[in-house]
Image (cartoon, rainbow, N blue to C red):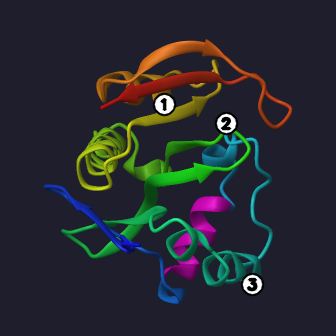
Amino acid sequence: MNTYRVGPQTQRLEHRAMTISDTEAFFSLNSNPEVMRYTGEPPLESIEAARDAIENYPDFETVGYGRWACVLKETNAMIGFCGLKYLTDLDCVDVGFRFLPEYWGQGLATEACAASIAFGLNEIKLERIVALVLEDNPASIRVLEKCGMKNNGTISYDEFNPLLYEVTR
């Protein structure tokens, strides 16, 4: 099995597996109520929980790919994450992203998401990639649509009814 610990490169972003050195940035991202508002997950409550999440992230070892840290090439700062996650309960691969609010509105999520989708379809040879997004999250919906994903209705998932977006090879 190939392990894609380094993901696609874009004009402004490097995608790579998170490391312990990303702990503070990961905590800032995942403890921010604005960022977590549409995720269905509770905000992280401690730096230790952030470190634990990074240390125990299994996806690269189990399926060969995962959510990559998005590192701004200009500053070498981790500003969010984007990548692919195999959802066992739905038996499909999901593209997901989160960025610190100060980087919203700059096209970075679209850049990262488009690169992750292309990587999944062309490099990993996935047949289909989905995205789950809450209807009241228009910014993320715009990103998915700019990346060529199409709305395929709603599904029931984790006590929510997100929209199901998808793209196929």
Q: Nearer the viewer, residue 48 or 55?
A: 55
The residue positioned farthest toward the bottom in the image shown:
20
Q: Quadrant of residue 46?
A: bottom right
Percent of width and height locating residue 11: 13, 55
As helix, strand or loop, the secondary structure at mark 3 comes to helix
Q: Are marks 3 and 1 in contact (CB under 8 Å)?
A: no
Residue type pointed to by label 3: Glu
Q: Residues within 10 Å of mark 3 (few under 14, many from 20)?
A: few
Residue shown at 54% from the left, 77% from the top: 61
Quadrant housing the N terminus? bottom left
Read off the residue under disc 3: 48
Q: Main secondary structure of the magenta part?
A: helix
Residue shown at 31% from the left, 30% from the top: 147
Sequence-wise, the earlier of marks 3 and 2 is 2
Give the extent of the magenta segment.
22-30
Residues at marks 1 and 2, CA–CA distance in whole angstroms: 9 Å
The residue positioned farthest toward the right in the image shown:
159
Residue type pointed to by label 2: Tyr
As helix, strand or loop, the secondary structure at mark 2 comes to loop
As helix, strand or loop, the secondary structure at mark 1 comes to helix
Q: Quadrant of residue 128?
A: top left
Q: Nearer the viewer, residue 4 or 67?
A: 4
Q: Are marks 1 and 2 in contact (CB under 8 Å)?
A: yes
Residue type pointed to by label 1: Ser
Magenta stretch encompasses residue 40: no
Disc assigned to residue 38: 2
Sequence-wise, the earlier of marks 3 and 1 is 3
Read off the residue under disc 1: 140
- Location of residue 108 with respect to 52 vertically, above or below: above
